[in-house]
Amino acid sequence: MIKFGPSGNSASFYLMGYKHTEQAPEYLDKFGLDCFEYSFGRGIMLSADKAVKIGRAFAEAGKEISVHAPYFINFANPDDEAVKKSYGYVLDSAKYLKLLGGKRLVFHPAAQGKASRGEAVSRTADRLKVLRDMIYENGLEDLMFCPETMGKLAQIGTLEEIVEFCKTDRVFTPAIDFGHINAREQGSLKTAADYKSRLEYAIDELGYDRVKNFHVHFSKIMYGGRGEIKHLTFDDVVYGPEFEPLAEVIKELELEPYIVSESDGTQAEDARTMKDIYLRVAGC
């Protein structure tokens, strides 16, 4: 079933007196939310024991948990030695994901750097084939590894690039960040048709079964000429994108994604707003 939840703990989590992520399931219950994304963005600073405790709390509450791997990953790095760290970031995150009891791992694929776009994309694709082999060698193929669409022009991660990467193997599932797409494409997502064309493209290329339960990040994002500048909240009326047209398309195409709000400080509140919109659109 479709799931909604926040990326990390919202400002209100702490204002309501909560302190530890083991308490997040109780907090999610107050909003009627279903899932949570734990970020290792700045590195894995979590003990194995703590991960197990968090995972137990989520399992007991019937809430799903995913992780976001460190932001330092760059599979387009021309230095083969440096790329070893990127493999490590993904594999270590996956091992912690198992301790947390989750199934989904989101990661940023690469940055273009000084290479041409074609060179950077090709290098990333080659490294993802190596990563695929490492995933199987480490017995992690039961997890979903989700390369994410990116919001800055200098980053590797257009929708087309992500879809192509996911053709490498079934262990890869697209993480489509609609705020990133909108920022990268200067406000391109306005109507249901705009969303539908993107999702039908992914389905045509990967097949319905591969896309049905895809990963979603959603937030309104300020952008400029080079793409993403910063995440906003649903109070923004300038940049968008809006969720309702996407909700209509998700219902029409009978998709059941895992939808994570990445709003700035109001993640849980905006996740609940998205759930309400979807339930209304779906007639539930």
Image: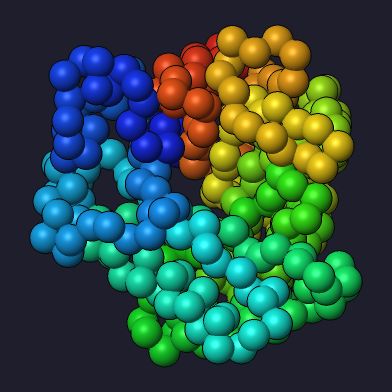
Instruction: Identify the residue shown where x is 41% and y is 32%.
Output: 5
> Which of the pair 178/116 is nearer the observer?
116
Q: Is residue 177 left or right of residue 202?
A: left
Q: How many marks?
A: 0
> Which of the pair 246/159 is nearer the observer?
159
Instruction: Identify the residue shown where x is 74% and y is 47%.
Output: 152
The quadrant holding residue 102 is bottom left
Please name the colour scheme applied to the rendered image. Answer: rainbow
Residue at the far front in the pictured view? 114
Q: Position of residue 243 (x, y in %)?
A: 65, 22
Is residue 47 placed above or below 10 in the rendered structure? below
Q: Position of residue 1 (x, y in %)?
A: 45, 38
Is residue 4 placed above or below 41 in the rendered structure? above
The quadrant holding residue 239 is top right
Instruction: Identify the residue shown where x is 50% and y is 26%.
Output: 264
Q: Position of residue 187 (x, y in %)?
A: 83, 28
> Which of the pair 248/108 is nearer the observer?
108
Q: Position of residue 52 (x, y in %)?
A: 15, 57
Is residue 110 placed above or below 86 in the rendered structure? above
Q: Is residue 124 left or right of residue 283?
A: right
Instruction: Identify the residue shown where x is 78% and y is 40%.
Output: 227
Task: Examine the rendering and report whether any part of residue 194 can be seen.
Answer: no
The quadrant holding residue 230 is top right
Task: Examine the rendering and report whether any part of residue 77 can be seen.
Answer: yes
